[in-house]
Image (spheres, rainbow, N blue to C red):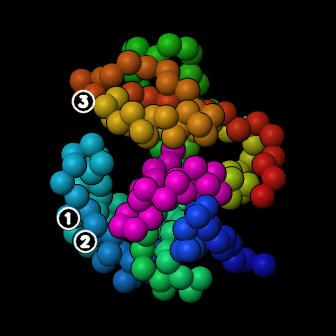
Amino acid sequence: MNRFEVAIRPEGVNESFYIHPAITSSQIEQLIAFTQSETDPVKLGRDGQRFMSREQYEEWSKKGRTIYTLTDNIDAEGRLKGIFWAGEKELPDRADYSESLDPNFYRHTYAFRLYDSARGKGISHSVLSTCIDEYVSKLSLPVGFWLETSGANEVAIHMDEKQGFRVVSGKNDQGLVTLVREYAMPLKI
């Protein structure tokens, strides 16, 4: 079976969310609308450079990222409630890493956002774990992941640490910290 879809149901909430392995044209428009309406620069991050317009999205999509969407419907055409993407990207060259990092090993990164009614439901960990596990299951292991996030975004750092990532840098001149994690054994999906 080529399809990957998972239902996520928050405890105590009469609502389900569904993870799908792609993004539809209407969901791209919803993604752009969410990005344009975001007023918190920490939450916006670099999405303002990726998703403020259809042209920016199309340019970003040429990077070949694997995309998973979170919707409110088992049908892949449901309303966009979140997005996860992962792919290969060069580890940033920084002098302040707290350990030696091989850029040939740490060559994958991801990003994750929740929107609208999916926020505040306590589903971030489940959605993120499911998407990472599915993405990693298609890679040759061992492999390393790296992330950059705002050092001021304590919620994101805590969530990434719950996923097994560790902070390996201080803040750079843009206020970003780097986190890394290794995947060495096959994951159970």
Residue at position x 37%, y 83% from top? 26
Q: Mark 1: few, some, or many residues within 10 Å (few <14, many ≥20)?
A: some
Element marked by disc 1? helix
Q: Quadrant of residue 12?
A: bottom right
Q: Quadrant of residue 3?
A: bottom right
Find residue 17 and report its horizontal and vertical position in percent: 55, 72
Please name the amino acid that badge 1 sits on.
Gln
Determine which residue is flagged by label 1: 36
Viewer-nearest residue: 129 or 58: 129
Please name the amino acid that badge 3 sits on.
Gln
Q: Are marks 2 and 1 in contact (CB under 8 Å)?
A: yes
Q: Are marks 3 and 2 in contact (CB under 8 Å)?
A: no
Q: Mark 2: few, some, or many residues within 10 Å (few <14, many ≥20)?
A: some
169 w.r.t. 181: above or below: above
Determine which residue is flagged by label 3: 174
Viewer-side label of 3, 1: 1
Instruction: Check residue 149 for magenta coloring.
Output: no
Element marked by disc 2? helix
Find residue 151 and report its horizontal and vertical position in percent: 34, 29
Q: Earlier in the sequence, mark 3 or mark 1?
A: 1
Determine which residue is flagged by label 2: 33
Point out the image quarter for the N terminus.
bottom right
Q: Are marks 3 and 1 in contact (CB under 8 Å)?
A: no
Viewer-side label of 3, 2: 2
Please name the amino acid that badge 2 sits on.
Ala
Find residue 91 and report its horizontal and vertical position in percent: 47, 33
The span picked out in magenta is 109-130
Does residue 58 show up?
Answer: no
Q: Mark 3: few, some, or many residues within 10 Å (few <14, many ≥20)?
A: few
Point out the image quarter for the C terminus.
bottom right
151 left or right of 21?
A: left
Element marked by disc 3? loop
